[in-house]
Image (tube, grey):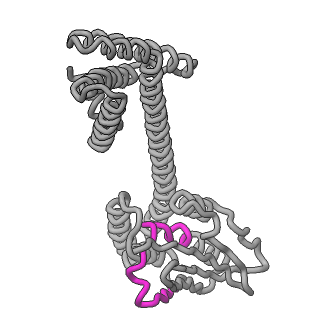
Amino acid sequence: KKLLSFNMATNPLFTSKYIKAASLSLFIWTVLHACFIYWLGYDIKIALADAAAFNFLLADFCLAQLFVMQFYQPKQDQTAYIIVAGTLTATSVTFISRFLLGLFNFDETYYAFIDKSIPVRIGVAFLFVAIINMISMLVKGLEEQKTNSARAFEAEKLSKEAELYNLRSQLQPHFLFNSLNSISALAGSKPEQARKMVQQLSDFLRGTIKKDNLQLIPLQEELHHLDLYLEIEKVRFGHRLETAIVSDENCQTKKIPSLLLQPILENAIKFGLYDTLENVQIVITASCDENYLSISISNPYDQTSSPPKKGTGFGLTSVQRRLYLLFSRNDLLDTKQTDNQFITTVKIPQPKL
């Protein structure tokens, strides 16, 4: 009983919309059937009895056929199944209704009419049952296709989330190891700076843990996170590292994937400071419109040394991949070299309100 109830509840053909449509169709067909018998010259009672016996039996058999289709859906030879099931059901409905009508002792001319019309009745019943079976197979197929599509979408979503998590988890140890090495170097000669860096590193990591489950955050939160990161790097590089953040006020609430800019900024510091002993300024510029938030990070580099290659390095590669997983686009990250500046630009599509 529970199994049948479950199947009725989950089968789209048993929803109220389809039940109402089927009931209305049955009523209209029964009325037309009775009118036809009455038009042939038979009494109204005979017409109603004929229509009711034949059509309500047909409805019961069609309902039973739907229950059968819940547990058995032919994968092959569907046409043969429809023909066999339709023939057996139509024959049963016709002869059972003939037997029931024979119990009323109607006029003999009416029973002669029934016997002559048996092939027609079988054909009509067969047509109804065949249509019911075809609709059931079609609905079942569409439901399976919908379920498979939803399952494939969920699998793809989980795969993307796993890859995003993997990309994020690879970035943290890379930065953490550099910071710990710097703390180790400062511990002996500059213990105050080492302690300060430990505290800053703690604040930074606490912020990354809180943001792990957030997909998009306001730009102002991302910039605050970058400030924590830059404070740590300034302890490492001292006065040599200078930074400037230029952001339009109306861009502060625009959305950006959390922790997206940190690997780009780390890449800029790496190529800007590692090959020089001079002061270096990293500039972060943010602009926006209705559709995009654009952020550029520029750093100087020495053209006489080995220039950074466009789009290389784990940091930029991971950002490119993450943007593709989130927005399904490969044109949201751009790098270019102008004079002695290396500029990385990220465009973030904004959600529609």
Residue 11 visible in the snapshot: no
Q: Is residue 348 magenta?
A: no
3 lies above or below 165: above
* Quadrant of the rendered image containing residue 18: top left
Residue at (47% x, 74% y) in the render: 350
Residue 209 location (% of width, % of height): 34, 59
Q: Position of residue 134 (x, y in %)?
A: 48, 29
Question: Is residue 329 in view from this perspective?
Answer: yes
Work out which residue is located at the far right of the displayed protein and give it.
304
147 and 247: which one is in front? 147
> Does residue 257 belong to the magenta stretch?
yes
Quadrant of the rendering where the N terminus is positioned: top left
Front in this rendered view, residue 102 or 89: 102
Q: Is residue 24 above or below residue 336?
A: above
Classify 97 as above or below 335.
above
In this view, the residue in front, 199 or 120, is: 120
Q: x, y (%) of residue 325?
A: 54, 57
Quadrant location of the C terminus?
bottom left
* Image position of 276 (left or right of 40): right
The x, y position of residue 116, in whole percent, is 43, 14
In the displayed structure, 237 sits above or below 123; it is: below
Question: Magenta residues?
Answer: 242-266
> Total of numbered circles in the picture?
0
Q: Nearer the viewer, residue 298 or 348?
A: 348
Q: Residue at x 50, y 58 (%)?
A: 171
Residue at image position (41%, 17%) is 90
* Residue plotted at (48% across, 86% down): 245
